[in-house]
Amino acid sequence: MKPPLVIGALGGSGTRVVARIVRRAGLYMGTHLNVSEDAMEFVEFYDRWINRFICRGQIPLTKTDTVQMEEEFYDCVAKHRAFIPAEQMDWGWKEPRSIYLLPFFHRYFQGLKFIHVIRDGRDMAFSVNQNQLRKHGKAVLPAPYDSLSQPEQTARLWNEINLMALSYGHENLRDRYMYLRFEDLCRDPKVTIARISKFLERDIDIEAALAEVVPPLSVGRWKNCGGSELLDKITCHARGALVRFGYD
């Protein structure tokens, strides 16, 4: 089995359009997808294991836990690939929460490629999609953040998971890791699609792929949300990643 391409991000960052572009490169990305084109075979697995994987800290999962997690993941992969046209076809999946399990996937697939999608953390703080904060916020953020407002908590979560993925990608995946900013895809789609094509080492009909890129009106929404005090707090919580990814 070829190693997969996995796409991850904070939910609402634009992974759906990236998955559609990847599909135009000829990769099999599954057939059992929701409206956001997430691979549904992995959803319950993520619900069950992400928080336990993150919370373990320096204490490894028990041998029984590890075996169970690996067996369940193997079943997810098998179900996801059930209708793949050819065994040696390039393949992968998109589920934004994959970003939390990147080290686990890498152990399972040494040749894994990962596309890390980024969207401005200030925009994400005001997103209607707060599923990851609701499901995994307590596993990622230390207890004092419980008292913060939702936009502040989201900004902190955005900062933590994106820096975590960047660090792991650069140190371990190297040229098999790529991050792209959603804003760049909206602003200059041809250049960004060409980057995706080069990363995948596959041709993409750029003119056809351009049809997938429809910049939402919500890009830059943070400029009109909240007051200056709240925006200052959000920026403070997200400062590290805002600077690292060129947003500040």
Image: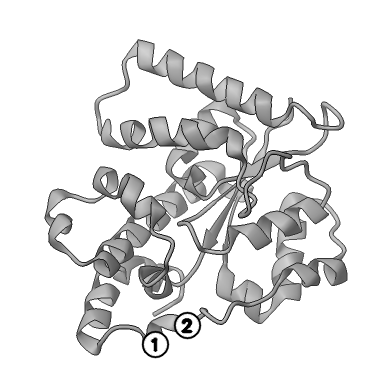
Q: Is residue 242 left or right of residue 15?
A: left
Q: Position of residue 194 (x, y in %)?
A: 76, 66
Q: Position of residue 111 (x, y in %)?
A: 64, 34
| Residue 215, label in figure | none
Local secondary structure at mark 2: loop
At label 1, which amino acid type do we have?
Answer: Lys
Residue depicted at x 55% and y 35%: 42
Q: Position of residue 243 (x, y in %)?
A: 38, 73
Whether residue 50 is situated above or below residue 137 in the rendered picture: above
Image quarter (top left, top right, bottom left or bottom right) of the N terminus = top right
Q: Position of residue 31 (x, y in %)?
A: 73, 40
Local secondary structure at mark 1: helix
* Residue 84 falls in image quadrant: top right
The residue where tag 2 is placed is: 220
Q: Nearer the viewer, residue 164 or 17?
A: 17
Image quarter (top left, top right, bottom left or bottom right) of the C terminus = bottom left
Residue 155 seen from this side: yes
Residue depicted at x 65% and y 42%: 93
**Residue lying furthest front in this view?**
35
Are there few (<14), some (14-19), or many (20+) residues within 10 Å of tag 2?
some
Distance of label 1 from label 2 (alpha carbons): 6 Å
At label 2, which amino acid type do we have?
Answer: Gly
Whether residue 226 is situated above or below residue 55 in the rendered picture: below
Q: How is the image coloured?
A: one colour
**Does the CB distance between marks 1 and 2 fall below 8 Å?**
yes
Residue depicted at x 81% and y 53%: 25
* Residue 145 falls in image quadrant: bottom left
